[in-house]
Amino acid sequence: MKCRICGSDQIGNQLSVREMMIPTREVFDYFECADCHCLQIRDIPDNLGAYYGPDYYSFQTPVERENAEAAGAERGTDDAARRSGEWDMTPILDVGCGAGKFLQELRAIGYGNLMGCDPFLEQDITYGDEIHIYKRTIHEMDGVYEKIFMNDAFEHVTDPHEVMESIHRLLSPDGVARIAIPIYPNIAYDMFGADWYQLDAPRHIFLHSRQSMELLAKEHGLRIVDVTYDADPSQIFRSYLYSKDIPFWEQKMSMILEDLGEKEVDDIEALSREANEKEYGDHAVFCLMK
């Protein structure tokens, strides 16, 4: 085994992880690179798309156009001004956008030049003149964007080096790429190991470390300008229920309250906040520039 990020053949932790979202409970092997500490699947399934399908949560029916406008009104957006042409036309690309929920949220607050791409979509999607979503990988996109988002998508790609190269190609000279990912190591993995729910085998191909993100960025002409840890208590709640063999879609907060009680739930919420402050939560946002 060799690390697909840094090329090292030095292996750290190895673990077997169950698929718990569909759930098939099929087991997939992961290993940690001892050098850059990226945790990654050993063998990428040939039929990876079969583990998504139309019921995967990011492909569910998106917010309808009128709901997006209502959301904009709630946030104080001047809808009449937007209709008269006063859109913010900053070019924005959302990579791995699913059915476009995040893009519709941007549209609702006044952005009007929105693109998305996701290779697992069934077909292209368009919402009016403002949102265009393509059944494509990032490598098939063209143009120049001032903002590129990858919201919980980078961990899904099988070719992170090539994706970073495409981000560099598409990003404007003073643009910002915002990559939100589960990150390793973290407090939830320390507590639950292979039951850490963000492993999400086999969809999460890479669980990046801060070191592996820094290596990728530097190698492809990008620099990390900010890192914010923003994990919420689900890092512990969902992992705890996985350890009880309860799949993702069957989990309810009432199960946590019944097992742990309100006092322990409050303690876990405080523990999650503390983990973020110590940069040890299980989710982080990386901002990159050229």
Image (cartoon, rainbow, N blue to C red):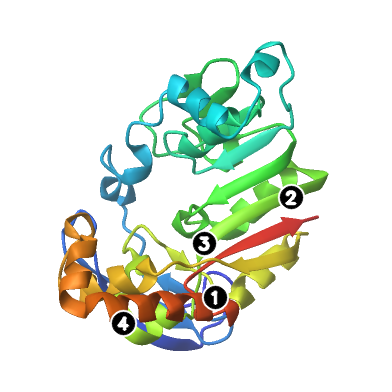
Q: Amino acid at mark 2?
A: Val
Q: Quadrant of the N terminus?
A: bottom left
Q: CA distance from mark 3 to mark 1?
A: 14 Å
Q: CA distance from mark 2 to mark 1?
A: 23 Å
Where does the image place residue 157, in percent across and percent down from the top left? Answer: 48, 54
- The residue carrying mark 1 is 276
- The residue carrying mark 3 is 181
Direction from residue 251 to residue 42 in the image, left or right: right
Q: CA distance from mark 4 to mark 2?
A: 34 Å
Direction from residue 265 to residue 273 in the image, left or right: right
- The residue carrying mark 4 is 192
Mark in the foreground, 3 or 1: 1
Q: CA distance from mark 4 to mark 3?
A: 19 Å
Where does the image place residue 181, in percent across and percent down from the top left? Answer: 52, 61
Is the Cβ of the residue at disc 3 closer than 8 Å to that at disc 2?
Answer: no
Residue at 51 percent across and 28 percent down: it is 133
